[in-house]
Amino acid sequence: MRLETSILIISFITAVVLGMMIIPILKKLKVGQIERDDGPQSHLKKQGTPTMGGMIMIITMLLIVTGTYVFLIFNNQSEIAHKLLPILLLTIGFGLIGFVDDFKKLVLRNTKGLKPSYKMLGLLIISVAYVVYLVYGLKLEIETYVPILKQFIEIPIYFYIPFAILVILGTTNAVNLTDGIDGLSSSVCAIIVTCLTIIGIMQGQMEISLFGSVVIGAILGFLMFNLHPAKVFMGDTGSLLLRRSDFSDGIVFKNAIAINCNCLNSCIRDIICYDSSGLFQKNRK
């Protein structure tokens, strides 16, 4: 528990320092938030706020997880260290695809961004590599917890692999639906990852508790700049990154179906926030 706390604090400080360095660069590049004109008029003032802030979390995770990996190796905990890598690679891989999409839209001024077919192909390749490595490389058990039945069921491996991949791809947009409102996506993700990290600590799954501590620190550090009035938004870079960090933790817990519910919860949360903000805007008039 002491190690997790130290990692969380170091991750938080790193994210804050990186935020102070990266946000001015984003402003200089004029990488601004684009608001839809069919939404509440109060949101239009966010137009131009720097986005692609997910870079802060990507770099933080890379630095701190790498440092944690080296620390574990030198302390004869190589088994736990090696289990951190697939979780990191899935998370960062999705984040980088989001970065390419944001970069084309906001820096290269290509309004279409990354072609959906290319984007999905990249996500598919990363998802397949991740699930295959978990099943065959780390010998992860293929039992899956079904909340309705309140029990684990063992899915045949030739069904489990495509099922897990389908869940990964099907929940891809669960976070970016809530991005664009000050502090919303980052605060929600902080709560979700904290919950998973606590479960990891209770179950003695150190790779989950360590990685979760890194992610929590990175999110909270980013949140310092994302609170109202937001100085930066995460963009697809951060939303894809955080969604995968949620799921990659969850699938190791063997509860892919439960994690899939986060997608629905995020969608419902987004609809409530959208409608509420519109209602308050009408009341002001």
Image: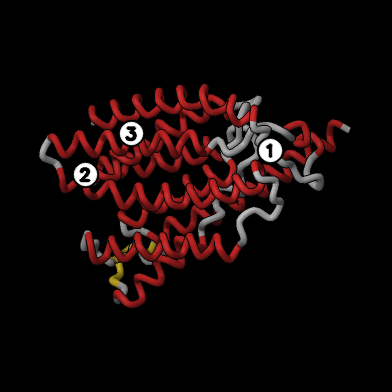
Please tell me which of labels 3 and 1 falls first in the chain.
Answer: 1
The disc placed on residue 64 is 3
Mark 2 and mark 3 lie on one chain; the one further toward the N terminus is: 3
Is residue 189 or residue 27 the one in the foreground?
Answer: 27
Quadrant of the frame with the N terminus: top left
Residue 71 place in picture, x, y as percent: 20, 33
Count neighbours of disc 2 (C-alpha within 10 A) and say few if under 14, some if 14 to 19, many if 20 or more.
Answer: many
| Mark 1 neighbour class, 10 Å CA radius: few under 14, some 14 to 19, many 20 or more | many
Q: Work out whether residue 285 or residue 222 is closer to the camera in this orientation and state it.
A: 222
Relative to 132, is 98 on the left or the right?
right
Q: Can residue 204 be seen in this view?
A: no
**Where does the image place residue 171, in percent across and percent down from the top left?**
51, 58
**Side of 209 where 164 appears, left or right:** right
Q: In which quarter of the image is residue 229?
A: top right
Q: Mark 2 points at which residue?
A: 81
Residue receiving disc 1 = 33
